Amino acid sequence: MLRLRPAGDRPLRLALLGAHCDDVEIGCGGLVLDLAERRGLATVDVLVVASDSPREAEARAALSAFSAPVVPTTRFGGLPDGRLPGHWDEVKDLLQDFSRDTEADVVLAPSPADAHQDHRLLGELAATAFRDALILHYEIPKWDGDLGAGKPQTYWPLSEQVVRRKYALLHQHYVSQRGHDWFREDTFTALARLRGMECRADYAEAFTARKTVLGWRAEGQGPADQPRG
Ligand SMILES: [Zn+2]
C-alpha cells in the first residue's frame, strides 16, 4: 500500500464534484468519513452541478455530517437533472470557477465511463479544470448496470463501521431517495465488500485514475511534492 501523505504531513484538501445531490456521498462517502474520523481533512470543497432547493438542503446536511469536524464549503449549480450535456458551457464555467477558487490535493469526481450522461460529462470535464491534482473517479451503482465500466484500479479500504455509518447517514439525510429500490443498505454494503475483497480488505471504495504522477519525498522536504494527478 502506498500512503497518501502531503509534504509536512498536513491534512488533505479535498474537492468533491457531484452531478447530483448524493453522488459524492454514494461514490466516496466512505473515504470522506474515514479521513474525517482520522482528522485527515484540512478542507472540503464541494460542487454539485444539477440541483434544486429541496435536495440542496438534504445535501448541505449530509455533506456536513460526512465531513465533520471540517465544515464543508458547498456550491450548487442549479442546472436541471438529466440535462447536463445540453448545458455544456454552464457546466464548464461552473467547473472552471470552482477549480480557480479551490486548492485541492485530491479531486473526487464521477467516472467518464459512467452510463449516466450527467455523471459522464462531469467526469470528462474534471481533468480540464483541475490540472495539478490527483483526480479519482468514483463509481455509482444504478439500474444501468455499468459497474466496473471504468475498470477501477485504485482502492480506499474501509472498516465495516465506516460502511455502516455511510449508509446510516445516506438514509438519514436523503429522505427524498428512500423510495428508490436501489437505495438500500445491502446495495452499498455488497459493493463495498466486493471492492474490499479485490484489495484484500474487509470493505473498500474503488476509483479510477486516468493520470497519476508519482514522486519521492525525502524527510523534511518542502511543499513542492504534493499528490498530483
Ligand atoms: Zn447522480
Image (spheres, rainbow, N blue to C red):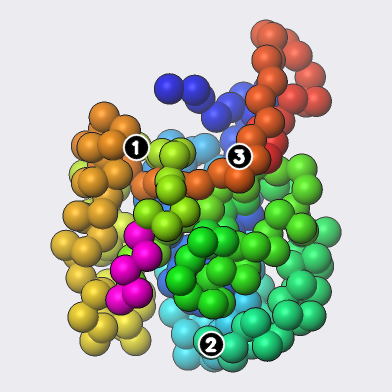
Nearer to the camera, 104 or 92: 92
Q: Position of residue 110 (x, y in %)?
A: 53, 62
Residue 208 in view of the camera: yes
Q: Amino acid at mark 1?
A: Pro
Q: Dot 3: what SS?
A: strand
Q: Residue at x 22, y 64 (%)?
A: 187
Q: Dot 2: what SS?
A: loop
Q: Mark 2: is the Cβ under 8 angstroms from ligand 1?
A: no
Q: Amino acid at mark 3?
A: Leu
Q: Position of residue 134 (x, y in %)?
A: 64, 42
Q: Dot 1: what SS?
A: strand
- Which numbered dot is residue 12? 3
- Which numbered dot is residue 81? 2
* Image quadrant containing the N terminus: top left
**127 horizontally vs 188: left or right:** right
Q: Mark 1: is the Cβ under 8 angstroms from ligand 1?
A: no
Residue 124 vertical placement versus 90 (above, below): above
Q: What is the magenta range?
A: 143-147
Q: Position of residue 185 (x, y in %)?
A: 19, 65
Q: Amino acid at mark 2?
A: Asp
* Image quadrant containing the C terminus: top right
**98 horizontally vs 5: left or right:** right
Whether residue 226 is in magenta: the answer is: no
Other-residue count near label 3 (Cα within 10 Å), few / some / many at <14 / 14–19 / ≥20: many
Other-residue count near label 1 (Cα within 10 Å), few / some / many at <14 / 14–19 / ≥20: many
Badge nearest the viewer, 3 or 1: 1
Q: Residue at x 29, y 44 (%)?
A: 195
Residue reaching furthest to the top: 219
- Which numbered dot is residue 173? none
Whether residue 146 is in magenta: the answer is: yes
